[in-house]
Image (spheres, helix red, strand yellow):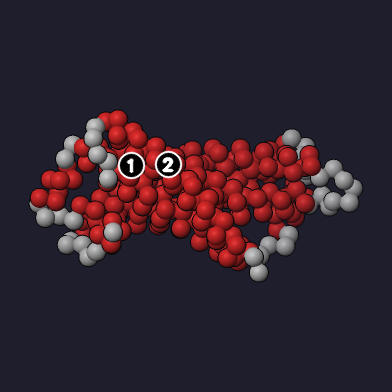
């Protein structure tokens, strides 16, 4: 019912455009530093662990780069980074809208005849669905680059082996799978967090509870839909 109100026709679309641009910066661009740091280090960790595990003479040396690429492209960047964003972005959205609810700002919007659900929530959903794929693409690049730098500098693999591995047996449809997951997760994070913020009742303590619930239920739904989409795409 809330989503029906969110996606109903806005009175003035130019206001929404301005809000969407603001949310792209607020939700997406501000999340870039933490995504960059986590991706670089996780890429390095995956590479070194893969090199440590592949000590059999039967395993080709390029398997380290191949494993790093598959891990980052299929699971780490789309799912794990989105779980981190659920904690950062989801709690922020829920507490922001929850604070507006308990200070009666949402009631004031309703009295003025504004569709408060559409005005507050739609720009967040649109902004996240637009910017999240770019963030995840940057995460994938930095993860693979971090794996290269740390793997080569630690002596886990050579430059040639790693680069050959990240190019070996690449299938473009795996990127469609990853970015489909990202768009679905972006919608889940923003809509679930907005729902809990919008339905906050009480005082400051309830805002904190709404923020916690938003992160918990967003994370559960992300993992559930990751399983569903993995079955749809890979189980053939």
Question: Where residue 69 sits: x, y (%)?
Answer: 66, 52
The residue indicated by pointer 1 is 94
Image quadrant in which the C terminus is located: bottom right
Q: Earlier in the sequence, mark 2 or mark 1?
A: 1
196 relative position to 175: left or right: left
Q: Nearer the viewer, residue 121 or 2?
A: 2
Q: Position of residue 230 (x, y in %)?
A: 59, 60
**In this picture, residue 10 sits left or right of residue 159:** left
Image-quadrant location for residue 167? bottom right
Please state which of residues 126 and 139 is positioned toward the viewer in this rendering.
126
Residue 195 seen anywhere in this rendered image of the structure: yes
Q: How many neighbours does mark 2 have within 10 angstroms: few (below 14), some (14-19), or many (20 or more)? A: many
Quarter of the N terminus within the rendering: bottom left
Q: What is the x, y in percent for residue 35?
A: 50, 42
Q: Name the side, left or right, on which 190 lies relative to 10.
A: right
Residue 215 badge: 2
- Mark-to-mark CA distance, 2 and 1: 9 Å
Helix or strand or loop: what does disc 2 sit on? helix
| Residue at x 36% of width, y 52% of height | 191
Residue positioned 25% across, 50% down in the render: 120
Residue drawn at (42%, 53%) of the image: 188
Extreme residue toward the top, this view: 205
Left-right relation of 107 to 178:
left
Q: Residue at x 48, y 45 (%)?
A: 219
SS under mark 1:
helix
As drawn, the label of residue 147 is none
Labelled pair 2, 1 in contact (Cβ < 8 Å): yes
């Amino acid at each position: 019912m809330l989503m029906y109100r969110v996606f109903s026709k806005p009175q003035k679309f130019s206001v929404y455009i301005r809000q969407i641009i603001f949310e792209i910066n607020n939700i997406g661009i501000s999340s870039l530093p933490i995504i960059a740091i986590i991706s670089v280090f996780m890429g390095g960790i995956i590479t070194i662990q893969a090199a440590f595990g592949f000590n059999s003479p039967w395993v080709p040396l390029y398997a380290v780069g191949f494993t790093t690429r598959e891990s980052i492209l299929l699971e780490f960047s789309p799912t794990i980074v989105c779980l981190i964003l659920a904690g950062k972005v989801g709690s922020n959205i829920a507490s922001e809208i929850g604070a507006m609810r308990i200070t009666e700002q949402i009631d004031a919007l309703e009295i003025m005849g504004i569709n408060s659900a559409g005005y507050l929530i739609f720009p967040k959903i649109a902004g996240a669905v637009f910017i999240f794929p770019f963030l995840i693409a940057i995460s994938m690049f930095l993860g693979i680059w971090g794996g290269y730098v740390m793997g080569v500098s630690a002596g886990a693999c050579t430059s040639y082996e790693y680069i050959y591995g990240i190019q070996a047996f690449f299938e473009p449809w795996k990127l469609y799978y990853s970015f489909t997951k990202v768009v679905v997760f972006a919608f889940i994070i923003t809509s679930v967090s907005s729902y809990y913020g919008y339905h906050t009742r009480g005082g400051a303590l309830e805002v904190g509870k709404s923020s916690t619930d938003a992160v918990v239920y967003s994370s559960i739904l992300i993992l559930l839909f990751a399983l569903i989409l993995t079955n749809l795409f890979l189980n053939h």
